[in-house]
Image: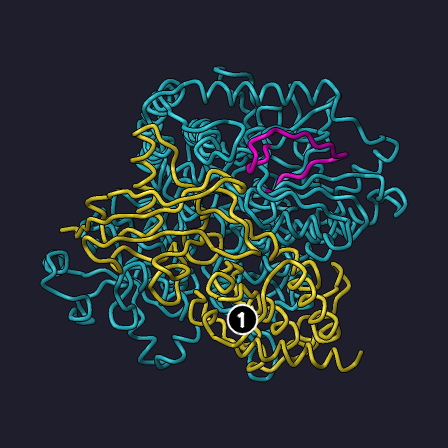
Chain colours: A cyan, B yellow
Amino acid sequence: MTQINSKIPQGPLAQKWSNYKASQKLVNPANKRRLDIIVVGTGLAGASAAASLGELGFNVLNFCIQDSPRRAHSIAAQGGINAAKNYPNDGDSVYRLFYDTIKGGDYRAREANVYRLAEVSNSIIDQCVAQGVPFAREYGGYLDNRSFGGAQVSRTFYAKGQTGQQLLLGAYSALSRQVSKGSVKLYTRYEMMDVVIINGKARGIIARNLRTGKLERFFGHAVVIATGGYGNTFFLSTNAMGSNGSAAMQCYRKGAYFANPCYAQIHPTCIPVHGEFQSKLTLMSESLRNDGRIWVPKKKEDVDAIRAGKLKPTQIPEDNRDYYLERRYPAFGNLVPRDVASRAAKERCDAGFGVGATGLAVYLDFSEAINRLGRDVVEARYGNLFQMYYKIVDEDPYETPMMIYPAIHYTMGGIWVDYECMTSIEGLFSIGEANFSDHGANRLGASALMQGLADGYFVLPYTIQNYLADEIRTPRMSTELPEFAEAEGSVQAKIQKIMAIKGNRSVDSIHKQLGLIMWDFVGMSRTKESLQEALDDIQKVKHEFWTNVYIPGESEDLNVELEKALRVADFIEIGELMARDALHREESCGGHFRAEYQTAEGEALRDDEHFSYVGCWKYEGEDKAPSLLKEPLVYETVHMQQRNYK
Amino acid sequence: MEKTINITLKVWRQKGPQSKGGFETYQLNNISIDSSFLEMLDVLNEKLISEKKEPVVFDHDCREGICGMCSLYINGHPHGPDEDVTTCQLHMRKFKDGETIIIEPWRSKGFPVIKDLMVDRSAFDKIIQAGGFVSVSTGGVPDGNAIPISKDKADEAMDAASCIGCGACVAACKNGSAMLFVSAKVSQLALLPQGKVEAARRAKAMVAKMDELGFGNCTNTGACESECPKSVSIAHIARLNREFLKAKLKD
């Protein structure tokens, strides 16, 4: 029986991280130069980690699939980043940020990790300001804050509606500084294809040079996976088109546990789906809920008139509007957490009150804010988001309410890691969205940027040394070793197998088929029956892919279809794992809503007695069911209770 | 009812950096006007794949106008005819039924073609690596509120920082100059106290790197500003020139 050791340090919650740092092993500067670290990914987590490790003196190899590290999808995050600075003097503290995050995650995150996250949050703001990130400021020159879902304080720092962009460019500039110094070597347009394990430890990767199609081998004393989430399993999501879960899947196949795959976040404020050709969903920042009020008509006849185009939303009088979030959750109102807001929107639409051509939309209305604050203030706060909406929908949100609907956004599941961000494979680390550790079953707004940068700047640079301190006598290894050859050979074989199918279906058409199954059966609401149906249907998609996909062109060339095919092959496996995990978790928590388990008011109903654990899936071989291991979640400080935002 | 249009595409196809390229013509019918330009290209590629032909290669990623990865020279304009948008945010409602649309890659010495419509923009990374950063290491920095920055300055820095590095400014410029890109970063960091210490060195180093990589000079035509999807102002070029001159005078 494999034991799961989360390596949570001893001592009271507030001292765990200090105690850890005080007693961990360090690597002296002369030895750091002799150690190579591979970092896969250049988003907030990957770029900040690569930059920090380079600053420390390690020799870093940093990989990304895009043409530049600056394109990582963290760039698209809009709203903001949390920190417990308490600048607005509204009662914030490290403990309160910790508590809100644990509660927001529906008590399915690891207490010690979340506390550490809250603890280092303040340093992140200081670091980014020092890098020249142009955060929004008050006239007096001090940093401005706003509030986000799941919190009753203003702790979110922001840079217009482009916070992710500015934070990523900050990390990218720190990374660029290391590249110029020679401590980091960048490999752009490279995709990790496999992780190489030698004597039980991660010692390198096989990567495909996307420009030439050739496979190349890279050695590292340690490997860090920072490749983001797997939300694109659904095809339509708010993720960038290239975001994928393949690196995580390769690690899983090599023995790293995949934890809580069923926890996918549904974001409530997305521009609704509008057609079959659609490739991607666009998010409207959650920050809009600070001033936007969400409603649908109270009367069915108004709904019908709107759908028929006979009535405009602005013509519906105040009394006939149902501000359902303010009605159901008076304490948090429009700022309830994402899972709660998403389910409430679905509930209204399912009940027949949805607007828009498809009936799958609700209004996000700024008229009250524009009357109260003036158009200029609203424009200063959200101008770029309004423009984005206008370009996509061709309707002016200053004049008429925006239409929004929930969409797949962020995945809280991922590669299992211990307190040191190390996976169940020695020397293989995972940070940011790619790991599972800090969010539980749901993620609050403005907390993903926080985790990515916390891991990269302030956690991994310490914890990785505890491992590397024992590796200083390990010389650099030759990539001619049989383990490298074997890994490359298996990647080669897989590529050849896909190229040889020469069927009749495009990669995208199969991916879309998978996505529909995922949304219908493993989406916002799941049941035992829907999940079993999904598992059957995914098998059919898998068969279709491996017998009927068609890849034009050559494998040893720039071949976008082949890149997509390799990722979709993995999305199929991830989809299966998500359905399997959702099926076994007979409770509702956060973004995982099993319709069988809900309160009389329709809220998610947890089962702490039976499911207060991290579900870790262990690969048992191709065409074999994975086995489930459990890491019990021990709450020493917080008392688990029903989440209540009323 | 969904509105659709029929269009003719003339697309630049080029097998590799060394190959000779040329235009191919494709006919597409019933394209929804609500689809984005890249979704229209997805439709074209699906059609090509179904005919067992190689799809058109183009760069794209976030498809929400922020990553800067998408490019395309459309009917003579970087990112197409619509103002203040990237190609992924350009919608087919901006085109007429029966229209012929010409699609080319960014054309500039600084951005060699990789394949079809995909170009190599790594020169931008090299310019940033020459000094587009604040030399601060992780940890041990002052409190974020320790150095107040006036809102006006912070906002101005933010406007400069909104550059997404897409390269439209270079593509739009008759000299293939990267001045708008360089000035945006120089300006952002020169406006903030955190970046000021190195401002002179930064301006010189980034301009030198830009010249070395084959980008041309600025002659104040303003094409970059009018084609910039983020409306980055050429006022930043003026600031870059001042910073550069100040630095040179100190030499």
The chain letter under disc 1 is A
Q: Quadrant of residue B84?
A: bottom left
Q: Position of residue A140 (x, y in %)?
A: 59, 84
Please provide the residue range marked out in magenta. Answer: A208-226
Judged from this view, the residue extending furthest toward the bottom is A140
Q: Nearer the viewer, residue A302 or A548?
A: A548
Q: Amino acid at mark 1?
A: Asn
Task: Name the quadrant of the C terminus of chain A.
Answer: bottom left
Residue A230 makes an appearance in the image: yes
Q: Position of residue A329 (x, y in %)?
A: 36, 60
Q: Position of residue A484 (x, y in %)?
A: 69, 23
Residue at 18 percent across and 54 percent down: it is B97
Where is A346 relative to B221, above or below?
above
Instruction: Give the side of residue A468 with respect to residue A211, left or right.
Output: right
Location of mark 1 (residue): A145
Q: Nearer the viewer, residue A484 or A92?
A: A484
Q: Position of residue A448 (x, y in %)?
A: 54, 52
Residue at 73 percent across and 48 percent down: it is A184
The question of residue A126 being in magenta is answered with no
Residue A155 makes an appearance in the image: no
The question of residue A210 being in magenta is answered with yes
Q: Quadrant of residue B78?
A: bottom left
Instruction: Give the side of residue A117 with respect to residue A78, left or right.
Output: right
Residue at 53 percent across and 36 percent down: it is A612
Task: Name the quadrant of the N terminus of chain A.
Answer: top right
Give the SS element for disc 1: loop
Where is A66 relative to B196, above or below?
above
